[in-house]
Image (spheres, rainbow, N blue to C red):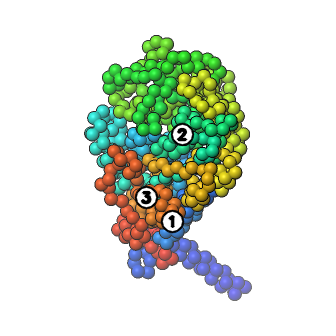
Amino acid sequence: MKYWKIGTLLLVLVLFMTACSSDKTDSDARDDSGVEHGEVVPSITILSSTPEANQTQYEAANMAAAEWRKLGIDVTVRPIEFNTMVDRVFNGEDHDFDVYTIGWSGRAERLDPDMFTYSILHSSNAGPGGNNSSGFVHAEFDALSAAQRQEMDIEKRREMIFEAQEIIANEVPFITTYVPMFVQAYNNERFTDVPLMVGEGIFSEWLPYYVKPLADDKVIRVGSTYDLNTLNPLDASTAYEWRILRLIYDKLVRISLEGAPTPAAASGWNVVDDTTVDVFVREGMTFHDGTPVTAEDVKFSFDFQIEHNPGYFLAFIDPIESVEVVDEFTVRFNLKNPYAPFVNNTLAQIPIIPKHYWENVMEEEGIASPADFPNLNPIGSGPMKFNHWRRGEEISLATNKDFYENIEIDGMIYRLYGQMEGIMAGLQRKDIDTLSDPMIPAHINQSRGIEHLTVTETGSIGFQFLGFNLRRVPFDNKEFRRALAYTVDFNTIVDAHLEGYGGFGGAGLNINEANQFWHNPNISRPGFDPSQARQVLEAAGYTWDSQGRLRLPTN
C-alpha cells in the first residue's frame, strides 16, 4: 500500500511537471538562455491550385511552403478545385483560410488601373463576394484609391496610382508569383484570322467577331480544364464564367483589341459633364427570345444589379447615383462623383439582361436573391446563343444570326478536360481547335512541331499570386508578410517551371510592366533571400525556441 501511494505521488508529480513544461513550450516563456518567447506561430495551410489545373502555381506553393518550414513554421499545402477555392476565399462568410494561390486575369477592361487598385484592395470590397479577399485595410491607401477614381486629370491620377503601388509593395497583402504569358495554339487548317487580345490571347470576346472558318464545319471548339459554377450573371464570380457569359450577354461597350472603348450594345455615348453620361442604345437589337432591347432593359440591368449588390461588380456600379430613361433608346447615368474609368470599367463590364425575364424571378422562383436563380436557359442579346451545358463535359453555343455584327462561325463548343495533357491530345487529334488558357512549356515546344497548329504569344497585365488572410494571425503583422516576400524563388518559377514563358513577380505587384503607362517602375521589391527573411523576423521581435519553432513577438 505504501509503495502504491509513493507511485501515485510520483505519477502526479510527473504529470504536474509535464503540464508546466507544456505551458512553457506553447505560451510566453523564457528559455534557458533567458530569451523571452511569444506564442508559437500558428500552423498555416496554403490552399493551392491542383497540379492538373495550374502546375506552376502548385509548384510555387510547395516551394514557398518548404522555405517557410525552414523558418520554423508548420505548413501544409492543400490543393483544391478552382470553384471550391473561389467559394471559400471570396464568398465565404467566415473567411476560413490562411493562404491561397490564385490569379487575376488580364482582360483588356483591366488596363485601367482601377480594377487592380480599388476593386481588389479597397476595404469596402473586403466582405463576402467582394474582390478584396485578403481583407486588406489601410486608411491612406483607401483614400488614395478612392481619390484616383474621381481624378479626371490623367497625370494627377497617374501620380496617385504610383503612390498606391508603393503602399501595396510595402504592406504586402499578397505576393505575385509570376506574370503569365499567353502562349497558345490553334488549328490553322480549320480557322484563320484568329485575333489576339492582351491578357487573354486567343479566347477573348473578340474571337467570334474576327475568326474565319476554312472548312464546312464552322463550329470552333475550345478546350479548357475549368468548368463553370453558374450561368447566372448575378452570381458569376470567376473569369472562366465570364468568358462564356459575355458571349451570351452583350454590354454597352467593349474594349477593342487595341485597348480602346468601342460601341457595342451602345451606338455611342456623350459625356455631358463630370457626373452625367448619356448612352445611346443601338436600335434594332433583340434578345435571343426575339424581344426588342430598349433603354428600359438597360436601366433595369443597372438598377437590378445595384439593388441586389453583386459583389463581383460592386466597385463598378457603386459610383452610380441613378439611371434615367430619356427616350426609347437613350439612357442617362448620373454619378455620385466624377468617375474616371466609368466607360472602360462600368459600361464595358455590366451585362444587359432582359427586364421581362428577370424582374419577377424572385417571386416566380420563390428565392431570396436573384443570385440563387439557376438560370439554366440564359437569354441575352450577345453574339452567341445558349444551346446546352453538360456539367463537366461541354458548353455549346450557337451564333446569334440577328446580331448587329457579321459573324462567320456557326457556333462554339467549350469542351472540358481533366488536365492539360488531355487538351494537348485533343489539339493533336483535331478534336479541338484551340484552348482557353496558356499552354504549359512542354506543350508549347510540342505544338511548334505539329504542322496543323499555329503557336501564338500574347503578353498579360494579369498576375498569379499567393494571397494572405490579413484578418488572422500571423498575417495581420506587416513585418511577417515582408519577411515572407524574401522566400519566393521568382527565378526558379519563371526560368525552370515556365521555361521563360512569363514575367517575374514581386511583393504586392498589382500593376506589371505590360501596363506600361500605369506601372510604377521605381519600386524596389525583395528578391529571393531566405537569410534576409530571418533578419526581418528577428528585427520585428520574432524568436526561435530550442526546437527551432518560430515564435510570435511578445509585445
Label disc, if present, on residue 496 of the rendered structure: 1
Which mark sits nearer the N-terminus, 1 or 2?
A: 2
Residue name at image x 32 percent, y 55 percent: 523
Q: Amino acid at mark 3?
A: Phe
Residue name at image x 72 percent, y 85 percent: 1
- Quarter the C terminus occupies: bottom left
Q: Amino acid at mark 1?
A: Ala
Q: Residues within 10 Å of mark 2 (few under 14, many from 20)?
A: few
164 sits left or right of 448 in the view: left
Q: Is residue 348 above or below residue 540?
A: above
Q: Amino acid at mark 2?
A: Asp
Q: Is residue 31 above or below residue 328?
A: below
Q: CA distance from mark 1 to mark 3?
A: 12 Å
Image coordinates of residue 27 in percent, x first then y, are 49, 68
Q: Badge 2 is on which residue?
A: 193
Q: CA distance from mark 3 to mark 2?
A: 31 Å
Q: Which secondary structure lies at badge 1?
A: helix
Image coordinates of residue 207 in percent, x first then y, are 55, 38
